[in-house]
Image (spheres, rainbow, N blue to C red):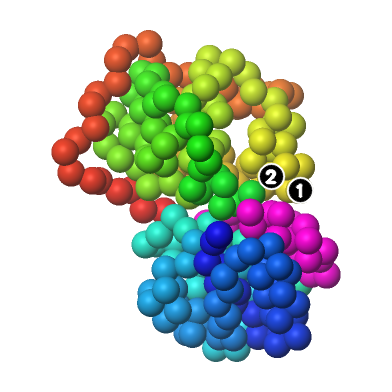
Amino acid sequence: MAKILVVEDDYALARLVEAYLIQAGHTVLRAETGEEALALWEQEKPDALILDLMLPGMSGEEVCRQIRARSAVPILMLTAKESEDDRVAGFRLGADDYVVKPFLPRELVARVEALLRRAHGEWGYPPPLNRGPFRVDPSARRAWVNGEEVFLTPTEFRLLEILLERSGQAVPRSVLVQALFQGWADSTALSVHIHRLRQKIEPEPSRPRYIKTVHGVGYRLDADDGPPKPPSDGETFIFP
């Protein structure tokens, strides 16, 4: 199963989360500070992080920022910060999911496992998708725009994949929320991920060429009909 880093300074809560993750078959690493979390992430390369935001010393937000600048590892924020502004800020930092305390431990485990499936996939991959300037390879979890590889988080990758599968069609917001978050998140989270995806694939994110808003419905990906450019030989990453 997966190796998961739990970053939480509340010892009792961290042990509770650890117990449920171990029961589900996962290996658990624990850190109580942001500095310890970064050191463990560098050393152990966990498959996912459960990250508290209010930590002694370095904040969880800074931990997320530093890790996301170098990695697409799934990050679930676990915090008492419950306002809409807090959730939006977390997603803009690159979090894939956001859980507010108090929470149900079994639900937390399920949400982490959903992130892992999006990040690492399962057997029976669909073939690569080629639409206009876009190429998405689900088996390798890699994406290219105009031949240049783009660095996407697991949620951003799945969002692009869904829109590309339905290229030219208006995809309702409710369908995207269910596919990405299994109904656990709201449309605010979707809006933030759309914004972040546009920042990475649009020539002018403020004037979207590809991901169009269909007012009152959802979003539509308009890909050109021509063949995509082949991926470049080198790996070019566009970091958030």
Q: Position of residue 94 (x, y in %)?
A: 52, 57
Disc assigned to residue 59: none
Q: Which residue is mark 2?
A: 181
Q: Is residue 97 magenta?
A: yes
The amino acid at mark 1 is Trp
Q: Is residue 156 magenta?
A: no
Whether tag 2 and tag 1 are in contact, CB under 8 A, the answer is: yes
Q: Position of residue 106 (x, y in %)?
A: 78, 61
Q: Is residue 97 left or right of residue 216?
A: left
Is residue 60 in view from this perspective? no
Q: For this rendering, which residue is in front, 231 or 43?
A: 43
Q: Position of residue 128 (x, y in %)?
A: 39, 26
- Residue numbers of the magenta segment: 84-113
Residue at the far left in the pictured view: 233
Measured in 3D between alpha carbons, the distance from the residue under mark 2 to the one under mark 1, in whole angstroms, is 5 Å
Tell me the element at label 2: helix
Tag count: 2
Disc assigned to residue 184: 1
Q: What is the magenta segment's predominant secondary structure?
A: helix
Position above or below: 66 against 144 = below
The amino acid at mark 2 is Phe
Q: Quadrant of residue 1?
A: bottom right
Q: For this rendering, which residue is in front, 36 or 47?
A: 47
